[in-house]
Amino acid sequence: MRAAYRVEIRKLLRSRVAFVATALMGLLLPAMGLGFYAVAVSGGNGSLADKAAALLTGEGWAGYLGQIDQIAAVALFLGAGVVVAWVFGREHSDRTFPSLFALPVGRGTIAGAKFLVLIVWMVVLSVLIAVVALTLGVVAGVAPWDTGVVLSELSRLVVISLGAAVLSLTMGLVASIGRGYLPAIGTMSVIVASSQIAVLLGTGGWFPFAVPGLMAVAGMEGMPTLTPVQLVLVPGLAAASIWLAIGWWTRAEVA
Amino acid sequence: MTAPIEAARLTRSFGAECAVDGIDLVVGAGEIHAIVGLNGAGKTTLMRLLLGMLHLDSGKARILGSDTDQATAAVWRRVGHLIETPFAYPELTVRENVMASALLHSVSPSSIRAAVDRVIEQFDLGHWANRRARILSLGNRQRLGLASALVHEPSVLILDEPANALDPAGVVFIRDLLRQYAGEGAAVLVSSHHLDQLARVAHTITVMHRGREVGMLDPGGIDLEQSFFDIVHRSDSAIREAQS
C-alpha cells in the first residue's frame, strides 16, 4: 500500500487539475460567501440583495459562514468530483491503465491508494476553506467576535464541505466503469439536478447527494430536519462506492 | 523445469471474433522469442493474456510456473512489460516516472535511487530527467517506457513493438539490450511487424495470423519477408478452402 500511496500522492501533487481545484475552492469559495453575505446585509433593494438575504441562515458569524455552507454543499461535490473523476479516469484517457497490470502491487491496492490520497486531500481542503473563511471574516469584520459561535459554525462548515466532497468519491466508481473522466462529469450534472428535484419533492433527506445542502439550510423555515440514518447514508454511500470501485479495479480487463 | 513463459491452447474471443485461437508457446530462460504478424494478427492480445490484462476463455497462461490469474507479487516482481502505451504520466518528470515504476515493482528503498539513475543513463534520458514527460517526443516517451519496464531488472520481459517510434540508433540499442537481457538468463517475448529488426536478435520467430500460429521463421533465413508472406498466404488459402 505504501508504494502505491507514494506514487498516487506524487501524481496528485503534480496535477494541474488538483492544483486549480484546490485554489478555486480553497480561496474563491470563501470569498464568494463573503461577497454574498456583504450583499445580503447591505440593505440594498436589488434582486441579488433580496435573494442573498433570503438565503441568510442567521446573523453575524452564523449568517456569514452559513452562506459559505450553502455554496460549499454544491461546489465541493462538483469541484472535488472533477478531481476524483480525473484521478480514476485519467488512467484510461491517458492510456496508462495497462501499465498497472502485472505488478507486485495489485490494482485493488492502487485504487485504494487513490481513494486514501483523495480523502486526505478532501480533509485538508475542507480545513483550508474554514481557515480562509475565518481569516476573511476577521479581516472584513463581519461581526463581533464570539468564540462559541465561530467554532461551532466553522466545525459545521468543515463537516458540510467534507460531506459534499466524500460524496464525490462515487465518481471514482463511475470514472472507472466509464473508463474515462467524461462519464463522471456527465453523471455529476445529472446528480446535481436530481438533488434539486428530490428536495423540491420533499424527499431530499433520503437522497444522500442532497444531504449536505439540507445541512447547510437546516433551521431555515420549511426545511426538513435530517435524521441520523439520513446523515449516515452520506459516508455509507461513499464507502460502498470505494468498495465497488476497488472490486472493479481488481477484476477489470484492459479495454 | 518449467519455462518462464508458457501458453497452452490459449484462446480468447471478443464477440464472434476469435482474437487468439489455441496458441501454444514456450519461451525458455535466455531465449528471445519473436511474434510477428500483420496488424490484427493477435500479437498484442496474446501478450495481454500472458500478463493477466485479459481473462482467458480457455487454455493456460503461465509466468514463472504460476497461472497468471494466481500469480503472486513475487512472480510479478520479476516481470517487466511494455504493451502499447509507455508508462509515462505526463505531469511527472522522467525521473519521477521511473521512480514510480520502481516503487510499483517493489524495488527496495535502499537501491531505488541507484536503479533509477542506472536506467536513466542506460536509456540516454539524462538530459530529460527533470523535465515533465508531457514534453517528450514519441521516441523519448518510448525510451522512458522501456526504462520503466526494466528498472527492476526483470527476468521475464514481454514487449509489444519495443522499437516503436525509435530512431535507427534506438533500434540498434534495443537489439543490444534484448541480447544482453537474454544473455543474463531472462526470457524475452517480443512482438513486431518489422521483420528485419527481429531477425537480427530472436532465437525463435513465430508467425501469427488471424489469431493462430501459422508457422515459424528461421531467424538465419535469407529472405524473411518472402518467407513470412508465403506462410500468411498459405494460411489464407487454407482458410478459404475450408470455407468453400
Image: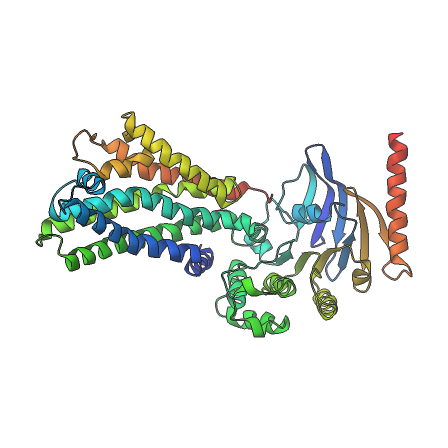
Residue B45 % position (x, y): 69, 45
- Left or right of B197: which side holds A31? left
Left or right: B130 with respect to A141?
A: right
The residue depicted at 39 percent of the width and 45 percent of the height is A81
The percent position of residue B78, horizontal first and vertical second, equals: 61, 59
Quarter containing the N terminus of chain B:
bottom right
Q: How is the image coloured?
A: rainbow
Q: Residue at x 72, y 54 (%)?
A: B3
Question: Which quadrant would the C terminus of chain B be assigned to in this image?
Answer: top right
Visible residue check, residue B202: no
Specify whether B14 is left or right of A106: right
How many discs mark residues in the rendered view? 0
Most extreme residue toward the top is A201
Q: Position of residue A228 (x, y in %)?
A: 23, 33
- Asked whether, in this view, residue A184 is left or right of residue B39, the answer is left
- Is residue A213 in sight in this rendering? yes
Give the image location of residue A235, x and y in percent. Answer: 32, 40
